[in-house]
């Protein structure tokens, strides 16, 4: 038998054996602990809660199928309270146990605080898309980048003939990342001669309770669409401000706000046209039977928990799934370098967010081609696709 076929048969046999391990047997062996640092309290609560829900669902699904080489997976959760200083303290505590990988944290600021501690390992898989790790580093990051959100939005704006754009961002790390991403995207050849322009660019602090002054200046520039970029509680402040000011324009925001919990809490402030850079699974769209199977597995995993997943669960689901894939391939006691090298070379991996390819050095594996602009449908209480992949026109 050829070596490649022999290896494939061996891998398939191992997978079948792992899947055959009963849950009772798994309970008798040492679990594979994966430490996770998230924002369960503070302004980032929406994010952390959804991410932990995703990990709980994944843990059950993985262990039902034999865990990692017959050992159950267990996610050890640490709350950094949306505080970068506490993120650093928790990272140091976890690293003292000589771990090879850490998931987290939930926000750009907390992830950036952790990153300098892991330059030589362990692997850090940030759950926020708002950072841009150096190629070849031990830091990876979740979801599509803010720069790619901008590209998808601008393509969609072109289809709607919305050329005058107002941008308001928070002054934290996530907002600063958005500043750079949305400004830089307008300088791409695709948009330089499109007529799109930022006619207003405002900022606010995440602790502000009013943004009336910023909205007044914004309205004076006669925008056609507003990009309101801040995750969690500060986004509610923006929505409330828009409502109170009578601003009646399409509002675009980031994926971190794509939670049913937020949409329910802010229901009285939600504008008629609220759009997001979404992922196809939220609209139950799949490009292949394999992608459909991954989506089915994802949704089925939440049924025992009584949870209807939204986009936030994918922030943790895919990174954790990729780490588990690495540990299955190189072993549950793999070194940080082995895990880093495995993920960096991973391609054609189908996750809930689409097909990953880490070989471009982005440390995230996804691009704007994985995105679809989506609108919150107030009547249906969910998101619907309003663009094709990448933000362009929908296929007919």
Image: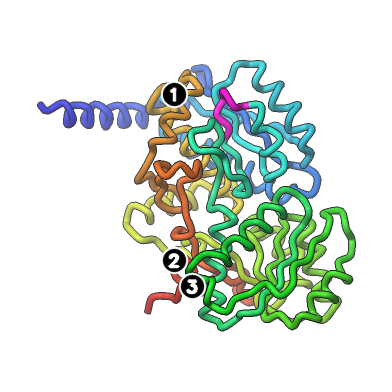
**Is 6 or 16 nearer to us in this picture?**
6
Left/right of residue 204 with respect to residue 3 in the rendered view: right
Question: For the magenta stretch, what is the residue range?
Answer: 118-124
Gap between marks 1 and 2 measured at Cα: 33 Å
Question: Residue under circle 1?
Answer: 338
On the image, the x and y values in percent for residue 145 come to 56, 53
Question: Which of the image's four quarters has the N terminus?
Answer: top left
In contact (CB < 8 Å): disc 1 and disc 3: no
Q: Is residue 280 left or right of residue 374?
A: left
Q: Nearer the viewer, residue 265 or 245?
A: 245
Q: CA distance from mark 3 to mark 2?
A: 7 Å
The quadrant in which residue 239 appears is bottom right
Frontmost residue, 281 versus 80: 80
Residue occupying image coordinates x 63% and y 37%:
104
Q: Which residue is mark 3?
A: 387
Residue at image x 71%, y 39%?
110
Q: Secondary structure at mark 2?
A: strand
> Residue 103's x, y, as percent?
60, 34
Res 79 label: none
Q: Residue at x 63, y 49 (%)?
A: 130
Rendered-image quadrant of the C terminus? bottom left
Give the label on residue 389, or none. Answer: 2
> What is the crowding at mark 2: few (fewer than 14 residues within 10 Å), some, or many (at least 20)?
many
Q: Residues within 10 Å of mark 3 (few under 14, many from 20)?
A: many
């Amino acid at each position: 038998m050829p070596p490649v076929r022999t290896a494939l048969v061996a891998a398939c046999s191992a997978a079948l054996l792992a899947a055959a391990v009963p849950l009772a047997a798994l309970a008798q062996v040492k679990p594979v602990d994966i430490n996770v640092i998230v924002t369960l309290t503070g302004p980032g609560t929406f994010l952390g809660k959804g991410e932990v829900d995703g990990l709980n669902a994944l843990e059950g699904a993985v262990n039902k199928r034999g865990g990692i080489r017959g050992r159950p997976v267990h996610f050890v959760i640490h709350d950094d309270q949306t505080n970068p200083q506490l993120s650093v303290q928790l990272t140091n505590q976890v690293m003292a146990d000589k771990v090879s990988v850490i998931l987290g944290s939930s926000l750009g600021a907390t992830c950036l605080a952790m990153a300098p501690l892991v330059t030589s390992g362990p692997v850090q898989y940030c759950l926020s898309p708002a950072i841009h790790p150096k190629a070849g580093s031990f830091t990876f990051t979740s979801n599509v980048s803010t720069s790619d959100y901008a590209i998808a939005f601008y393509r969609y704006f072109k289809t709607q003939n919305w050329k005058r754009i107002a941008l308001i961002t928070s002054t934290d790390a996530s907002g600063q990342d958005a500043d750079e991403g949305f400004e830089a995207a307008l300088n791409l050849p695709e948009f330089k001669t499109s007529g799109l322009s930022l006619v207003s660019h405002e900022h606010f602090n995440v602790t502000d309770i009013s943004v009336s002054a910023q909205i007044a200046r914004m309205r004076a520039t006669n925008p056609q669409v507003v990009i309101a970029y801040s995750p969690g509680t500060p986004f509610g402040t923006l929505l409330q401000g828009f409502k109170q000011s009578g601003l009646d324009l399409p509002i675009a925001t980031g994926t971190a706000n794509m939670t049913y919990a937020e949409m329910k809490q802010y229901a009285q402030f939600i504008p008629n046209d609220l759009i997001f850079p979404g992922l196809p699974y939220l609209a139950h769209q799949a490009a292949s039977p394999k992608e459909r199977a991954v989506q089915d597995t994802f949704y089925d995993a939440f049924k025992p928990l009584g949870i209807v997943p939204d986009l936030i669960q994918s922030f943790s689901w895919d990174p954790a799934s990729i780490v588990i894939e690495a540990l299955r391939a190189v072993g549950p006691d793999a070194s940080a370098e082995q895990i880093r090298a495995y993920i960096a070379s991973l391609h054609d991996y189908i996750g809930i967010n689409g097909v990953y390819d880490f070989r471009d050095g982005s440390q995230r594996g996804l691009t704007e081609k994985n995105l679809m602009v989506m609108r919150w449908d107030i009547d249906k209480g969910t998101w619907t696709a309003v663009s094709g992949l990448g933000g362009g026109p929908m296929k007919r």
